[in-house]
Image (cartoon, rainbow, N blue to C red):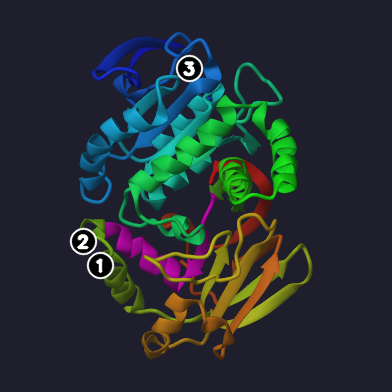
Amino acid sequence: MEMVAWYNQITLGGVQTAMAKSSVVLRAGHPLAPDLSPDRSMLSSSGLSSNRRRDLVFIVNPRGANGRTGKDWKKLLPYLRSRLGGDCNICESLTSGPLHAIDITREAIREGAEAVIAVGGDGTLHEVVNGFFWDGKPVSDHIKEAAHSTALGLIPLGTGSDFARTFGWKNDPHEAIERIARGNLLVRLPLLPSIMFELILNTISSNTIFCSLNVRFLWDCFIGLRSRIDVGVISGESGELHYFINVADVHLSAKAGYYASRYKRFGNLCYVIGALQGFMGHRNVDLRVKVNKGEWEIYSQVSAICIGNAKYFGGGMKITPNADPHSGNLEVVILQDFKWYDFILKLHKLYKGTHLSVKNVSSRNVHSIEVEDISGSGGVYVQSDGEHLGFLPRKFCILPAAIEMIS
């Protein structure tokens, strides 16, 4: 099936933004999201530059943060053009609704994009991450070059930017563009990493302050620009797989997140409103848990289970403080027998990440964890990266080093 589509191509060497018309080939077995319209598909086999690896795809949620994301993105474009240089082909795509970013990401990877950059909050990032996978496997480009891997990038502009906090990134889009520029430098100069060691040796032998500064510059340029990060995967009774990059959670926190998503127009206040609604009628439940395919364990009066690939959720709450997306593990934090006043009294500990020493809080690192409801109450909420997924039972696993990220 073929269809004509439009995408925005920003030529970095120029001033004007041009519209390029292209033909997108939609392959059998890769259905579009229900809301994906022909004028929203963005990449094409004919619309890319001759050097496929020079395409940077920016996926923007213009309605994020109550419309502020779209406005801020337009203001960023002049700086983006001036900073990234004339050798980059910037492809811009504005999402039209839920799941659209997933489709755009998959098509970008298939067409050999160098990087896909999520512009928005954790919700947009979540969809882009899910676009890196299809039918339980990583999406690959048509060229099928083993050495080529589309990287993931992030410009935080949404309501919540919890994933960025784990890396210590500020909610500063200009800083994010600098990260992307440095990550892009490594690709443009593929021979320099091999030369770097000789330069470092020469610098050390010279033992001068000036050369030491050069070593520092080279180190900043070439170390840590891109790294492979872990991704969590969730499966349920249907067998459908769902991916997360930040934190997945069960019961009260997931229920609060479900309600909070209805009030994003109020900014970070949505988390407070969601928590208040989540507490209404809340009851702790008995769950059974299986860790790393071991024996089932019973956890009584569970208030919440948080499974972290990264550290923060809920607008800056450091819920899984020891999680590290480079570790190959998920950190699981279980809160038991918490009353509404416990959350209020211990809220400061939850935000600081010092709650692991609190009574009825346990933590462990796992490769996989299965959770089932045995209370008979039914309707135990599950969410990942702030997105509602449904209800228990669920299995959570780690995919080590699954995605290359510009960091």
- Kindly check if marks 2 and 1 are in contact, taking CB atoms under 8 A apart as contact: yes
Q: Distance between the residues labelled 3 and 1?
A: 41 Å
Residue 235 located left or right of residue 8: right
Q: Is residue 95 above or below residue 24?
A: below
Q: In this view, does 312 lie above or below 137?
A: below
| Residue 177 x/y as whole percent | 40, 40
Q: In this view, does 162 lie above or below 252?
A: above
Dot 2 amino acid type? Phe
Checking the image for residue 269, the label placed there is: 1
Asked if residue 324 is among those painted magenta in the image, a careful observer would answer no
Dot 1 amino acid type? Leu
Mark 2: which secondary structure?
Answer: helix
Q: Which residue is drawn at 65% across and 54% down?
A: 326
So how many labels did they put on this image?
Answer: 3
Residue 57 sits in quarter: top left
| Residue 182 x/y as whole percent | 50, 38
Q: Residues within 10 Å of mark 2 (few under 14, many from 20)?
A: some
Q: Residues within 10 Å of mark 3 (few under 14, many from 20)?
A: some
Dot 3 amino acid type? Leu
Mark 3: which secondary structure?
Answer: loop
- The residue carrying mark 2 is 266
